[in-house]
Each structure stands twice: as structure tokens, then as C-alpha cells.
Image: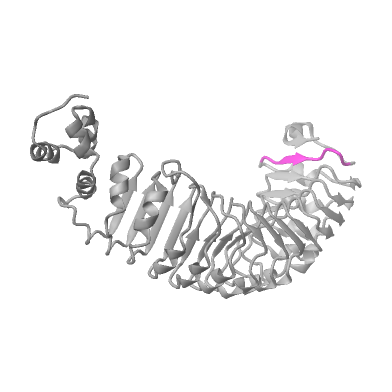
Amino acid sequence: MATTHLPNELIESILDWIDIQTASKMRLVSKSFNAIIASDRFSRAGIARLIPPHKEPDVSNWTRVFLFGASPVSLQRAFVSLRLINTKSLNLWNLDIHAMSTAITTAHSLTNLGIFYGNKKIGGGDWNIPAEIGMLENLEAFTVTHSELAGEIPPTISKLSKLCSLKLSVNNLTGCIPDSICACESLQFLILDSNKLAGPIPTGIGRLRNLTRMILSSNQLSGDIPHSIGFLQCLRVLNLSNNRFSGDVPNSIGSISTLKILNLCDNELTGCLASFIMENLCSLTELFLDNNKFTGPIPDQICVLKRLVSFSAVSNRLSGVVPETIGQLENLQNLMLARNNFSGKFPLDIGSIKYLEHLEISGNNDPLLGIIFDEIESREEFLLVKFSDNSLFGDLAEAFRSNFLF
């Protein structure tokens, strides 16, 4: 690297006229250029120039800030020294999370904080949600995704009384879902999927009366699903799949009239479907119960789910006759009942469901008898049917053979 005899003041003046990305490439011009470009003064000035019309490093009036990992590391570190007093929205992409955390907790006016694809490799080691997060009393939305966030959700989360959205998907969070989260009664979105959270859902979860989406899938959560979940009368999406929940599904879930999607797949749940399939589930469009230990028949009252589009209960211990009332589900597109213990006569009306596209009943231990294909043959719509490992009787039109899997 060469040495230049230009005064530092002149070098700074030259760099002030050049955009920050071009200036950053001039570090090899000389040692003096390199030192100035790596300095906090240059980086702070660079940050100010990223968001027009600001020309000076006075950021006290910035309300929305987006910072991306494409920026030089020195610029990222300079961010720490800024006091974003009036900043309301802060979004960080692919940055040095260790450097960011200090600056974040001093921005007391924040209403929206988003961290996406945080890069812990720059600072080294794991990073956690700091307890000081509770100081951001105006925070309404807190999102950290794909950022290798570790540790536990701090109990100070309870101080965020205005928090409407908490999304911490695809990280390495451990520990339990803290009871203190139930104090965030403004929450509408609780999205904690794809972490390593363990233990039960807090029994006080019913206090979150404004929740519309609760997605806790792909964790290590266990225990019973709390009865208080039925108090969430604004809930539209409940996804508890791929955990270790056990016991019966509380009948209180059957009272949530706003529920559209219920996914309980891949747990150790037991009991009968009749305990929670109730008339109040009138908005339900998707019901997924695969890979559990449910027993007994599909209840006749399945027909009350008039808006149901997808019903899957593959790999359970369900038995008895598939009820004829299932043919009353006019909007049904996908019906998957494979690998159970169903027997007896399959309902004749199943082929008349106008929108049915996928029917799978393979792998039942006892043969399903008496399937009549008259209704299926008359269909104009394509229907994919998988019948293997069952005993079927009836005529199957050769023209429709391509629509069936055996």
C-alpha cells in the first residue's frame, strides 16, 4: 500500500464528494485513505448520506431506517454510536448482530424492529434477545427471522404492552415460552415456529384475546394443549404441528368460530375427533391431524364444517365406517384418510363432491367395501384417488383409469 503526502483534510474533502461504495474501494490508494475510510467519522457521515435528503450525520429526526449487510463493516459499527432518538421503524438485513444490539436498545421511540438474516459470524458467538428489549415500551412489531437467535425469550417481554406482532421464526431459541408473554394482551400475531422451544404452552395463553395467528410448529413443545386456548375467539390460524403435545385436544377449541386453519400434525395427541369437531367451527377451511394417535370414528357432525377444503387424518388409529355426512362437504378438495383402521361401506356420495381433487384411503387395515363408481364416472373434473391396500368392489370405467392410483 502506497503512502500519500496529501493532508487528511484534503482527503476527507475528496471522499465527501464520492458515493460511499466507491469511496470504500479507495482504501488501497494509500495508508492515509485507508485510515480515514475505516474511521468512525467517515462511517457516520456515510450513514447520513445513505438516506437523502440528509447530508450531515445528524440522525435525530430519522423515523425509518433500513441498513443492509452490503454496507462496510466499519459503517455497521458506526451505527452503534448513533442515537436514533426519534426512529420509529428499524429494519436490519444481514448485519453484525452483536454490534447492532447496543444501538437497538437505545432507540426508545421504536414501534417496528425487524432483523432478517442476522450475521453473528462477524461478532462471533451466540446472540440473545437482550433483557433491555423491555425498555422499548412503544414497540408494536418485533421480528427476528433466519438469524440464529439463541437463548431464551426474556421475561421482560411482558413490558411491551403495545406489542401486536412477535415473529421469531427459524432461529435457535431454547427454553420455555415464558408465562410473562401472556401479559402482552395486544398481541395479534405470535409466530415462534422452527426453534428449539420446549415445555408446555403457558396456561395463561387465553389472556391474549386479540390473537389472530398462533404458529408454534417445529419446536419441542410438550404436554397438554391448554383448555384456555378456547378463549382466543379471534384466532384464525392455529398451527401446533411437529411438536410433542399429548393428551386429548381440548373441546374448547371447537368453540372458536373464527378459526380457519387448524394444524395438529406430528404430535402424540389422543382421544376422539368428536370431542372438538363442533358446530362453532363454521369458518374452518383446513384441518390437518396427521401422525397422531386419534381413535374412534369420524363423527357424523363433520358435515357442520361447510367451508372445509382440506381434511387430512393420515396415520392415526381411526376406525369404523367413514360417515355418509362427509359427502355434504361441498367445498372439499382434499380428503386424506390413509393408514387408519377404517372398514365397512364407503359413502356413495363422495364422488359427487364437485371440487374434490384428491382422495386417499390407502393402507387401512380392514377392507373398505362396496365402493360404487357411478358418481365418480360421471365427473367432468379430474379426481386423483389412491386405493391401494384396500378391497374394492364395483365397475371402474376404463376411460377414468388414469385418474386412480392403486
Please count the marks in the image.
0
Look at the image and name its color scheme.
Answer: one colour
Residue at image coords 18%, 28%: 30
Q: Nearer the viewer, residue 108 or 162?
A: 108
Place residue 220 in its image quadrant: bottom right
Question: Which image quarter is the C terminus in?
Answer: top right
Report the side of 297 relative to 54 (left or right).
right
Place residue 193 in its image quadrant: bottom right
Q: Position of residue 77 (x, y in %)?
A: 31, 47
- Can I make out residue 253 in this image? yes
Report the side of 130 relative to 23 (left or right).
right
Q: Nearer the viewer, residue 334 or 87?
A: 87
Question: Is residue 387 part of the magenta span, yes or no?
Answer: yes
Question: Which image quarter is the N terminus in?
Answer: top left
Q: Nearer the viewer, residue 66 or 288?
A: 66
Q: Residue furthest top?
A: 2
Report the side of 20 relative to 364 (left or right).
left
Place residue 16 in its image quadrant: top left
Q: Position of residue 317 (x, y in %)?
A: 84, 53
Which range is magenta?
382-390
321 above or below 148? below
Q: Position of residue 235 (x, y in %)?
A: 57, 67
Q: Nearer the viewer, residue 346 or 237?
A: 237
- Can I make out residue 321 in this image? no
18 above or below 138? above
Q: Position of residue 380 (x, y in %)?
A: 67, 41
Question: Is residue 148 part of the magenta span, yes or no?
Answer: no
Most frequent secondary structure within the magenta stretch: loop
